Image: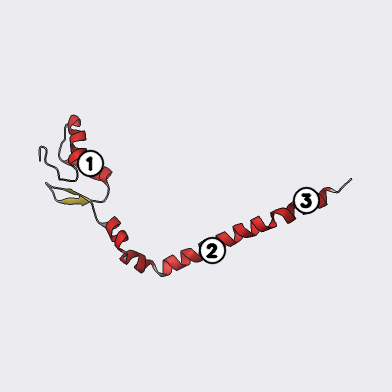
């Protein structure tokens, strides 16, 4: 009968390449992180990054700008007392500006 140990050895031989790949991938990710840390200003200057940073929802009454639609609508419903049935209307008109009860 064969020894358990050499069966394990065969297993190791079969899976060695896979494990090495995983190690390489981790290394590459680490290097990429370092690169990103070094060159973050370039990514910041990129156009789509700026596009993402710009606030897309502006509240007309107080002129407050929001990056996220959710925070914008929460602000609307808390600051400018919208009746709850008007919420879908607000969602429709969010890009135009707050035109209801302003």
Q: Looking at the image, which residue is at 36% across and 65% down?
A: 43
The image quadrant where one finds the N terminus is top right
User: Between disc 1 and disc 2, whose residue precedes?
Assistant: 2
Q: Where does residue 31 sit, x and y in percent of width and height?
A: 51, 66
Please, is residue 49 above or below residue 82 in the view?
Answer: below
Quadrant hosting residue 88: top left
Q: Residue 97, which numbered label?
A: none
Q: Looking at the image, which residue is at 20% across and 52% down?
A: 65
User: Between disc 3 and disc 1, whose residue precedes?
Assistant: 3
Rounded to the nearest angstrom, the CA distance separating label 3 from label 1 is 60 Å
Q: Which residue is mark 1?
A: 73
Q: Which residue is mark 2?
A: 28
- Of residues 4 and 47, the one nearer the viewer is 47
Q: Where does residue 7 sit, x and y in percent of width and height?
A: 80, 49
Rounded to the nearest angstrom, the CA distance separating label 2 from label 3 is 29 Å
Q: Is residue 14 visible?
A: yes
Q: Residue 8, which numbered label?
A: 3
Q: Nearer the viewer, mark 1 or mark 2?
A: 2
15 relative to 36 in the view: left or right: right
Residue at the limit of the structure toward the bottom, as seen here: 38
Q: Where does residue 82 sit, x and y in percent of width and height?
A: 16, 35
- Mark 1 closeness class: few <14, some 14–19, many ≥20 residues within 10 Å: some
User: Between disc 2 and disc 3, whose residue precedes?
Assistant: 3
Q: Where does residue 20 sit, x and y in percent of width and height?
A: 64, 60
């Amino acid at each position: 009968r064969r020894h358990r140990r050499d069966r394990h050895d065969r297993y190791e031989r079969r899976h060695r390449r896979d494990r090495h790949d995983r190690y390489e991938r981790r290394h590459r990710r680490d290097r990429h992180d370092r690169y990103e840390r070094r060159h973050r200003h370039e990514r910041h200057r990129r156009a789509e990054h700026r596009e993402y940073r710009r606030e897309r929802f502006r509240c007309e009454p107080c002129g407050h700008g929001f990056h996220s639609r959710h925070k914008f609508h929460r602000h609307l419903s808390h600051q400018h007392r919208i009746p709850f049935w008007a919420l879908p209307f607000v969602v429709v008109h969010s890009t135009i500006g707050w035109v209801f009860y302003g």
